[in-house]
Structure formats: C-alpha cells, structure tokens
Amino acid sequence: MKLRAGLAAVLLLHASAGALAADAASRPNIVILLADDWGFTDVGAFGGEMATPNIDALAAKGVRFANFHVAGSCSPTRAMLQTGVSNHRAGLGNMPETIPPAHQGKPGYDAVLNNKVVTMAAQLRAAGYRTLFTGKWHLGKAADKLPGANGYDRAFALSQSGADNFENKPNLLLYEKADWTEDGKPAALKGYSSTFIIDKTIGYIDEGRKGQPFLASVNFLANHIPVQAPDADIARYKGRYDSGWDALRETRRQGAIKAGVMPAGLPMVRMDTTADWRALSAADKAQKARAMEAYGGMATAMDRELGRLVAHLKARGKYDNTVFVFLSDNGGEGIDPMALGNPINRWLVDMSYDIRPEQQGRPGSFTAIGTSFASAVSAPLRGYKFSASEGGMRVPLIIAWPGNSAVQQGAVAKGFAFVTDVAPTLLSLAGVMPQHGEFAGRKVEPMTGFSLVPMLTGAAEAVHPAEQPLGYELSGNAVLFKGDWKLVKNLPPYGDGQWHLYDIVRDPGEARDMAKAEPARLAAMQADYAAFAARDSVLEMPAGYSAPQQVQDNARRDLAWPYFKAAAPWLAGLVALLGGGLWAIRRRRRA
C-alpha cells in the first residue's frame, strides 16, 4: 500500500513539475523572504489587522498554506529550511542559547549546522545559479559554518539570534558584540535593519550576469526582540491595541476564518499565561499597548522594504519569472526579559537601554510584547515561540510564481506541510534533482521533505502520505504528526510535560484533547514517536530543564567569562593591594 502511494506521489510530482517547466521561458529566480517570530495571523492575508500590503499582494499571486509547520524556534527552522533535513540530523537538536551543557557536542547537538548536510544553495550553485544571502543566519559563526562555506556566493550575515535594529550593537542581554560579517569578513549594520538588508540584497542581485538565475535568501530581524521601528510606522498603530490581547485574539480568530485559513466555528483556548487585561493599571495597559504598537510598526516597516525589493525586480523585468517564498521561522515571541523576575536581567536592561514606556520601539530601547500579546499574534492557535503547540509551529507560508499560469493564484492549500518540504520544492521548480544522500562525491544526510509542487498547481490537496508519521523535538517539547492528528508534549513553562492528542484539521486551536477518547491512536502514535526519537538520537532533557531559564544561564556564562578574563589582572592587583594594606595595618597594630 505504501509503495503504491509513494509511486503515485512521484508520478504526480513529475506531472506537476513538468507543467510548470513547460510554461517557464527559463529557469526561475528564487527569493526566500524569512520573517522572524511572526505569528500565524500577523499577515493581513491570514486574517491579521497589521498593514502588510506587499505580502498580501504576493498571496494574491500565489498559494497560501494554512497547515504549514516549522520548528518552535529559529535556528532549527533555518537548518531545515536550508537543507530539507530534520533539525537533529542537521546538527540543531538544540540552539546555542537554549542547549544544556550536558547535551553539547552529542550526536545531533552540535548547536550549529553540521558537515553532514548540504544546503539547497550549494545544489543550486552547482546547477548554475548565483546564490545570495542577507540577514540573520544563526547556524554557526566559525568560518566553515558561515553562508559562504555553505553554498552562497555573496553573504551579509548575522550569526546570532538577533541584534539591535538601528545601531551596530548586539542584544546586550545575550552577546558581547553584534557578529555581522560580509563574505566571511567582519562587517557592520549601517541603517535600519530591514532597510539595510534589502539594500544589500538589491546590490547583490544587480551584480549578476545577464540571464543567470539567482537564489536570494532574505532573512529579516523583524520582529525579533528588541522590537524596534521607525517612529512613523509605530505612530500608525497608536491606540490600535488599547482594548488588549483578548480582544485582539477574537478579532484575529474572525479574520482567519474570513481569510479561509481557519475553519468556521473554530474553538479557541485561552492560554494560562495570558494575564487579565482588566486587572492591569492604566499605566501597565499603556505600556503593553505601546509595545504592541511598536510590533505592528516593525512588521509594516519590513513589509515596505520587502515591497521595495519586489518593485526593483519588476523594474528590471525579473518579477514574472521569480518564485517568491514568504514564511516565518516560528510563532510569536513570548519571552520578555523584563518580566522573568530576574534582578540581574532587570539591572542589565536598566543599565543598557532606555526603557521609558514612551520610548518603546525607538532607537536605544528594548521592547518585547510578552506572553499575552504573543498568544494573540498566534491566534486562534494555542501557544507561541519555543512551544510545540500550533501557535509555536504553525506559521504563514506563501509561494508565488507570478508569471507562471500553472501556479494557482489566491488559493489556500489546507493539506499538511512541513519546513523540510521547502528546499525540495524550490529545487524541483528550478529543474534541479534534489540530492538523495550524495552530493559532489560525498555522502550526506538525504532530504526528507516532499515537494509541494502538486499543491501549488492544484493537482493534489496534500503530498504527505496520511499513514506516514513525522516526528519533531526541540528543548524537550515534542510532536508526532500523522495524517490529521498531532501528538504533542510541552515541558513547563509551556505545558505540563504530558502527552496530548489533537485533530489539528478540525481543531487547529488544540482546544479538545482526544487522548482519553482515542487510546489506541494515542498508543500507536507514542510508539511512532519513540521510533523517531531513537532514529534521530533525541536526548531526554535534564531534570527541571526550562528553556527560558537555560537562555539566562547560558548568557550569564558566555558574557561573564570574557569580562572576568579581561578583569582578572586588575582584580588580582586589587586583591594584592588590599591584602598588602591589611598586612601593613596589622603590623602597625602589633608594633
């Protein structure tokens, strides 16, 4: 049965890919537009209220994927996006910021992209494409881990999870300096991040030879913390969020249903981590609403710069024959360093940033929307970034090829899709056979994703066989997808550490746990997950592990040690001086 289903899928893929190739005058350019920490309904075309007209225009020219999933956090998603291989097999079983020391260096826990995988950039370059990278990389900072060593001809890249958007400085709570490089050499951000990233992208594209296709991977910092935007963009949202997060969740629920990306009558949970808006003081309401205004401004600023790139491609006659891919790396960010109850964090923020409420989102500020609004931007789903709930993993995906009539325009694809599907899809559209375990004479991890081409053309509603399980794990938060069903476990503070079972087609908000009603399905999917965990060498998390706490612990270790080494000679001298002084005082007293 599985063999027949697999053969049918292969034949369907070839038929769909052939239809696309027949309409294409030449191999398409490819532009990947990766947003950072955008929730499922942050895009207007997915039901949100924020102004994203340029992303919405791409949605009107292509297909919106309503059941598309990524990892619960950034670098594991980026590894799978670049390679089409699961995060554990690509080396990102955990991130540098969240990995417990006991796991570091174990198989699959390199915390950087390992040398067992090959990127789609490397495969496209071998096929004659120019390959360009701009923005956040977060897959390693050593020379052999940067984009230039992984298939990209030109690259302006940030090796870290985030940085300031107005200045060439890091997130001072996590890093000592902003690690930007250009083609492997130290570089600096010059101007607002979304603007500068697009400036670099346009410059790289214009360097190309006439007629040579290109891959441009464009990776924005928006809307990672610190949330920052130009004043005019923040101002357009003034007062928009004064009604609070519960009102926003309901507005977005209705918007998602109207947009066709969520089913009518969708039940929706209220997160335990969502505070009571009515119980807040007027000052707290104003502060939190202003943070969300800055978030909206940051998204709109990014959309405007994205539109500038699209306009440039139109002016150069490249728009029609370009495949555009828009997605987010995970759901909305719930961590607010100011709300973690850690006095050291609070002191660092006070010392390093302007945290006056009226300055939120402006240069020199440090702004985060926190768990309650993070739940709202991922509405109507449960959860947000880091969690394995739908709000952490289900994000907007848009794929458009404006000049190719075989690609549906304005359609919504409701079949299940996963981030490892993107690379084989783009390679297929470029006429490049995805690698299946060997590249340039060396053995590599084979791609595990499925091409989404049949869903783009409307030839199939789904490409993943209903009976084939797909496992995922990050920081102890675990999932097994199988057909319409999802088995999920979240560790505190994101869940209770127990397995839950949901029908995510009829109940994408994960409101009805079916574990007791479906004991046989629960047991079978638990066995499937165990097989995946053994195959991908998934490790159990240490007792009491918490991802937010591990971020703080790793940051203190990584930041404190360099400062201690630098200060050690001075501290030794001070100790010697104090010791000498005490010795002299004692001698004098004895005399």
Image: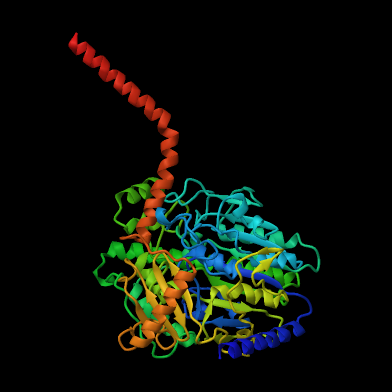
Task: State the image coordinates of residue 394 (x, y, percent, origin top left).
Answer: 47, 76
Task: State the image coordinates of residue 359 (x, y, percent, origin top left).
Answer: 41, 55
Quadrant, the N terminus? bottom right
The residue closer to the viewer here, 523 or 215, is: 523
Q: Residue furthest left?
A: 590
Which image quarter: residue 503?
A: bottom left
Quadrant, the C terminus? top left
The residue closer to the viewer here, 446 or 61, is: 446
Report the side of 379 relative to 535 (left or right). Answer: left
Residue placed at 46% from the left, 80% from the top? 481
Which image quarter: residue 158?
A: bottom right
Task: State the image coordinates of residue 247 (x, y, percent, origin top left).
Answer: 35, 77
Colouring method of the image: rainbow
Residue placed at 45% from the left, 57% from the top? 226
Residue placed at 42% from the left, 90% from the top? 264
The residue closer to the viewer here, 138 or 543, is: 543
Which image quarter: residue 335?
A: bottom left
Q: Residue furthest right?
A: 210
Whether residue 380 can be seen here:
no
The residue closer to the viewer here, 581 or 468, is: 468
Task: State the image coordinates of residue 341 (x, y, percent, origin top left).
Answer: 29, 56
On screen, residue 298 above or below 531: above
Residue placed at 73% from the left, 85% from the top? 18
Whether residue 456 can be seen here:
yes
